[in-house]
Image (spheres, rainbow, N blue to C red):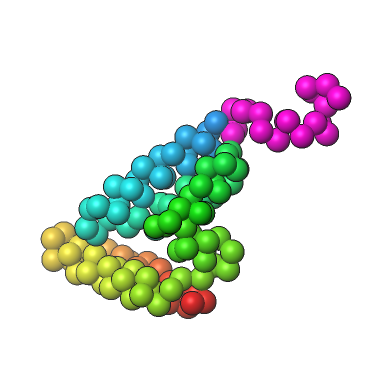
Amino acid sequence: MSADDPTNPADKYRMTPARLIWLVGGLAMFGLGIVGAFLPLMPSTIFLIMAVWCFGKSSPRLEAWLLNHPRFGPTLRNWHERKAISRPAKVMAVGGMAVGYGLFYWGARPNIYVAAGVLVAMAACAVYVATRPE
């Protein structure tokens, strides 16, 4: 079996330009997720979900590490396997969106059309989160 043989199992782990892009994206998302774990009002879970997705396309080892992480693993596995969000996470996410919209409206003082557009987008996101399985 040669190195260029498409049936060679080692090809699965060869670093191609596409895999490198996914790896860099996964590392960036992981970094943002860690920052979000410490900064109020910045989400962490969505960035970690995106990191798992990127690592799934680039590094099975990093994907497994993140899915089995003692702190983040259970939440990420729930999403990865069942697209499920726990009730406390739903409450925090929807509450965070409401607070975020309030701060946006108070701080930006948008016109009625911008305010309505942002409200509709955030409400759609809140409905999506609220209707996921638990």
Q: Is residue 5 above or below residue 70?
A: above
The residue shown at (63%, 28%) is 16
Horizontally, residue 28 falls left or right of residue 103, namely right
Q: Residue 55 location in percent, x, y?
A: 54, 43
Horizontally, residue 46 falls left or right of residue 40, namely right
The residue shown at (31%, 71%) is 92
Viewer-proximal residue, 121 or 33? Answer: 33
Residue 2 part of the magenta-drawn span: yes
Q: Is residue 101 above or below residue 24?
A: below
Q: Is residue 55 visible?
A: no
Q: Residue 42 location in percent, x, y?
A: 28, 55
Q: Is residue 134 visible?
A: yes
Q: Residue 83 location in percent, x, y?
A: 54, 67
Q: Residue 73 location in percent, x, y?
A: 47, 58
The residue shown at (24%, 65%) is 100
Looking at this view, name the residue that lies furthest to the front. Answer: 70
Q: Please provide the residue range marked out in magenta.
A: 1-19
